[in-house]
Image (cartoon, grey):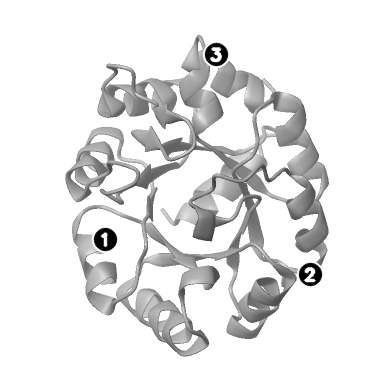
Amino acid sequence: MKFSTAILNQKSTGAIPVIPDIKCVSPKHGDLLRGRCPVEAAKLLKNAGTAVMSVVTEPKEFCGSLELLRNIADTTGLPILRKDFITTTDDLKISLDNGAAAILLMCATQTEKSLFELYETALQLGIEPLVETHTLAEMQLARKLGAMLIGINNRDITRLERDDGTVTNTRHLAEFAPENAVIVSESGINTPEEARQAIDAGADAVLIGTALWQAADMAAFYQQLCGR
């Protein structure tokens, strides 16, 4: 199943589609695992009802890996978004080979030419590109691209999300998204109330990592975020 289709299917049930972000380390908050196994956490979140998942594979700042991506894809059987700094067509093929159903293409780290090339190649390979924006200029670029799955990062990825972005950025940008695009509000969402604010601002789903990892009961908090 396509990543975006799984999101819309979950949305149709009346729940807020929450995309758990499986990451081992946050540059801002440090070690998130605290001795836990990320694959076991992914299984826990699947049992809690998640329809899709995101896995950070960047090794230097986030301590991710392709092995982690493959293990979670194999274990859960869910559509998985690979989050990393994708820059080449080889990165796309490697993502597909390791179980990703979707990949993140960040406007902030691409030239317009490379973004268009990677977007078209991803579609040809059958892997869904999520085009990430943070500014109005980047949203306009996503419109020009014709992107139908768009992320609005509430924080600045060029600062490794160390800033204090909020869902206000989703509110500012969502109205400029292409009609019928699936919008994902990313980062800076810490409570069920903020998740609802992002949806009310025009997002179809929210991507949440750190707040889930910091929760006393990850599965229960996931369901609270979904509005269950």
Q: On screen, 119 above or below 62?
A: below
Relative to 28, is 138 on the left or the right? right
Relative to 135, is 69 on the left or the right? left
Disc 2 residue type (three-letter): Phe
- Would you say residue 202 is visible in this rendering? no
Q: Position of residue 218 (x, y in %)?
A: 48, 17
Residue 96 image-quadrant placement: bottom left
Label 3 to label 2: alpha-carbon separation = 34 Å
Q: Position of residue 31 (x, y in %)?
A: 36, 27
* Crowd band around label 3 with a 10 angstrom C-alpha radius: few (<14), some (14–19), many (20+): some
Disc 3 residue type (three-letter): Ala
Which residue is pictured at 74% across the width and 33% down the height? Answer: 194
Q: Nearer the viewer, residue 161 or 120?
A: 161
Which residue is pictured at 81% across the width and 49% down the height? Answer: 201
Of marks 3 and 2, which one's residue comes earlier in the chain? 2
Residue under numbered circle 3: 220
Residue under numbered circle 2: 176
Label 1 to label 2: alpha-carbon separation = 29 Å
For label 2, the SS is helix
* Crowd band around label 1 with a 10 angstrom C-alpha radius: few (<14), some (14–19), many (20+): many
Residue under numbered circle 1: 95
Q: On screen, 139 above or below 124?
A: above
Q: Position of residue 124 (x, y in %)?
A: 35, 80
Which residue is pictured at 64% across the width and 59% down the height? Answer: 182
